[in-house]
């Protein structure tokens, strides 16, 4: 874990050794977390190796923060992730229901009126 890993912004998939280096965790910890946190679902390459997406990597880093920095237990981290997912879903649903933010329709109407005056 002592080697420094530079994250390529264009890279989409990571092998377990790369994720281990980025997160500063042992591969055995990552495999254990896969069994505990059902949200972590790496795919498999043609050769059978685990292949993590960037979303998996972000989730692993979030779990590490919850467990190591904020000192959550595994059940507590699961609950926190579930709550975050629930809040994100609510925000997504509420924004999907709105056509536009309040005030934007008035601005649009005023701009259209100005446009008509200029024509």
Image: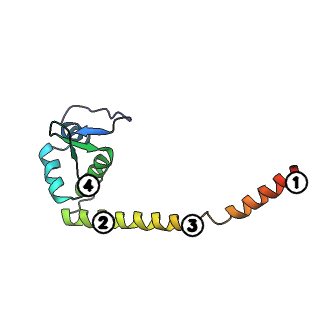
Residue 82's mark?
A: 2
Q: Left or right of 44: which side holds 8?
A: right
Give 20 or 2, whichever is nearer the viewer. Answer: 20
The spot of residue 91 in percent (x, y) is 46, 65
Q: Is residue 31 left or right of residue 60?
A: left
- Residue 91 lies left or right of residue 10; in this view the side is right
Q: Which mark is residue 63?
A: 4
Residue 77 percent location from the top left of the image: 25, 62
- The colour scheme is rainbow
Residue under numbered circle 1: 117
Mark 2 or 4: in front is 2
Marks 2 and 4, the one that precedes in the sequence = 4
**Which numbered disc covers residue 22?**
none
Element carrying mark 1: helix
Q: Nearer the viewer, mark 3 or mark 2?
A: 3
What's the distance in space between the residues labelled 3 and 1, CA to CA?
Answer: 30 Å
Residues at discs 4 and 3 in contact (Cβ within 8 Å): no
Name the residue at 76% across, 61% down.
109
Measured as percent of width and height from the top left, residue 70 is found at: 27, 58
In the picture of the structure, the residue carrying the numbered disc 3 is: 98
Q: Which residue shows up at 23% across the image and 59% down it?
A: 71
Q: Quadrant of the N terminus?
A: top left
Q: Nearer the viewer, mark 1 or mark 2?
A: 1
Q: Earlier in the sequence, mark 4 or mark 1?
A: 4
| Residue 15 x, y percent position in the rendering | 21, 38
Q: CA distance from mark 2 to mark 4?
A: 12 Å
Q: Is residue 13 above or below residue 86?
A: above
For the point 21% across and 58% down, the residue is 37
Mark closer to the chain start, 3 or 1: 3
Q: Badge 4: how crowded within 10 Å, few (<14), some, or many (20+)?
A: many
């Amino acid at each position: 874990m002592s080697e420094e890993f530079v994250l390529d912004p264009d890279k989409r998939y990571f092998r377990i050794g790369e994720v281990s280096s980025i997160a500063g965790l042992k591969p055995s910890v990552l495999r254990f977390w896969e069994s505990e946190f059902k949200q972590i679902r790496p795919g498999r390459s043609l050769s059978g190796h685990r292949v993590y997406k960037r979303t998996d990597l972000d989730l692993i880093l979030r779990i590490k923060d919850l467990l190591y920095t904020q000192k959550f237990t595994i059940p507590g981290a699961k609950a926190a992730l579930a709550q975050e997912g629930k809040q994100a879903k609510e925000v997504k649903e509420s924004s999907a229901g709105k056509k536009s933010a309040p005030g934007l329709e008035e601005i649009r109407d005023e701009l259209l009126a100005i446009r008509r005056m200029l024509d």
